[in-house]
Image (spheres, rainbow, N blue to C red):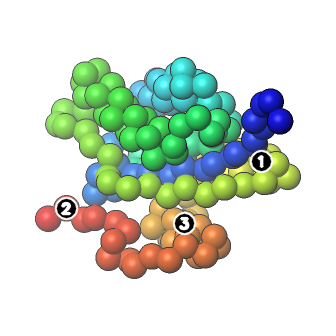
Amino acid sequence: MADSYSKIQIHVVFAVKYRNALIHADWEEELYKYITGIVTAKGHKLLAINGMPDHIHIFIGLRPVEALSALVREIKKASTNFINQRGFIQHKFQWQEGYGSFSYAESQVKTVVNYILNQKEHHAVKKFNREFIEMLQEFGVEYTVEHLFKDAA
């Protein structure tokens, strides 16, 4: 076979450090556009992006030329610099260490996109911590609660 073919669709979730509600509505769209630029510049396809003041969801059509961990590391590093250089918040912005990633079949894409695009409505009834634990359980990911969320010391 001369070419390689793949369809890898990954839902990535990560939180603001200490899950502080720092992402404000007046600049979140600018942040999402910036992250979209990172993803597309690296040759991947952004399927959906949205979030809440304390976390973000990104649905990516991932090309297998780059490890997901490297892409997420670049997104978090570059977006942290972007937020801090723009002075969107008064103190230093940071993402929490780690992330969740979940793969989906083509038949699930519309459902996942709708879920991500409707984050504000979804979180009116379900908090992030509960949502993330449910995702881990749904996908059979082993975890320990004390390693999921870091609280401020």
Image x and y of residue 86, in percent: 29, 21
Q: Residue at x 83, y 36 (%)?
A: 1
Q: Please say whether residue 88 is visible from this viewpoint.
A: no
Q: Amino acid at mark 3?
A: Glu
> What count of labels does the image hold?
3
Within 10 Å of disc 3 (Cα), the crowding (few <14, some 14-19, many 20+) is few
Determine contact: label 3, label 1, CB under 8 Å.
no
In the rendering, which numbered label is found on residue 152?
A: 2
Image x and y of residue 40, in percent: 58, 24
Which residue is nearer to you in this view: 27 or 150? Answer: 150
Within 10 Å of disc 1 (Cα), the crowding (few <14, some 14-19, many 20+) is some
Which residue is nearer to you in this view: 91 or 144? Answer: 144
Within 10 Å of disc 2 (Cα), the crowding (few <14, some 14-19, many 20+) is few
Determine contact: label 3, label 2, CB under 8 Å.
no
Reading the image, the residue beneath label 1 is 109
Q: Residue at x 78, y 37 (%)?
A: 5
Q: Considering the image in quadrants, where does the C terminus appear? A: bottom left
Q: Amino acid at mark 1?
A: Val
User: Which residue, as the protein is rendered here, is positioned at the far front?
Assistant: 1
In the rendering, which numbered label is found on residue 131?
A: 3
